[in-house]
Amino acid sequence: MQDSELSYFKEILESRQVQIVKNISGVNDELDQLNSLELNDEGDHASVDNSSMIESAIVQQQEQELREINVTLGKISVGDYGVCEMCEDPIGFQRLKVKPHAIYCIDCREIVEKSS
């Protein structure tokens, strides 16, 4: 992969990393606000509990993506970026444009998904 392509993906990943950290911080602030509300009835409690569950699921998904991005940025720094972890072939440029932190090429991703 050319240096310009690596720089392109590194910039995308770092930008997404910053956005995810902001998102997680915002959701955590919302959860703190929900937890500090004085609730008067069971309906209010149920509504807050439901919102908290949804927000917590979003945070978990974003934390997982953040971990994947951090691993990918490490791969860029050591020169292992864009190589499928299963077959060790290059991951296609178009696939990386869609998911810059992909660890599998399209063929191997399908194999992994079918075996899950």
Image: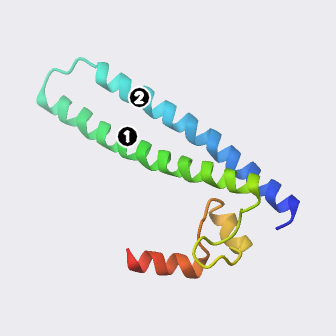
Q: Which residue is drawn at 44% across and 26% down?
A: 29
Q: Position of residue 86 (x, y in %)?
A: 57, 75
Q: What element does badge 2 sit on?
A: helix
Q: How far apart are marks 2 and 1 (CA)?
A: 8 Å
Q: Which residue is drawn at 87% across and 59% down?
A: 4
Disc ID at residue 30: 2
Rendered position, 5 above or below 46: below
Quarter of the figure with residue 52: top left
* Quadrant location of the N terminus in the rendered image: bottom right
In the current view of this chain or complex, which residue is farthest to the left? 42
Q: What element does badge 1 sit on?
A: helix
> In the image, is 109 to the left or to the right of 10?
left
| Sequence-first disc among 2 and 1 | 2
Q: Position of residue 35 (x, y in %)?
A: 30, 24
Q: Residue at x 65, y 76 (%)?
A: 88
> Tag count in the figure?
2
Q: Position of residue 74 (x, y in %)?
A: 68, 51
The kind of residue tagged 2 is Glu
Q: Along the line of sight, which residue is nearer the eye, 70 or 92?
A: 70
* Quadrant location of the C terminus in the rendered image: bottom left
Q: Which residue position holds label 1?
A: 55
Rendered position, 46 above or below 102: above
- Say if mark 2 contacts mark 1, CB within 8 Å: yes
> In the image, is 13 to the left or to the right of 65?
right
Rendered position, 12 above or below 103: above
Quarter of the figure with residue 113: bottom left
Rendered position, 49 above or below 90: above
The kind of residue tagged 1 is Glu
Q: Which residue is drawn at 53% across and 75% down?
A: 109
> In the image, is 20 to the left or to the right of 8?
left
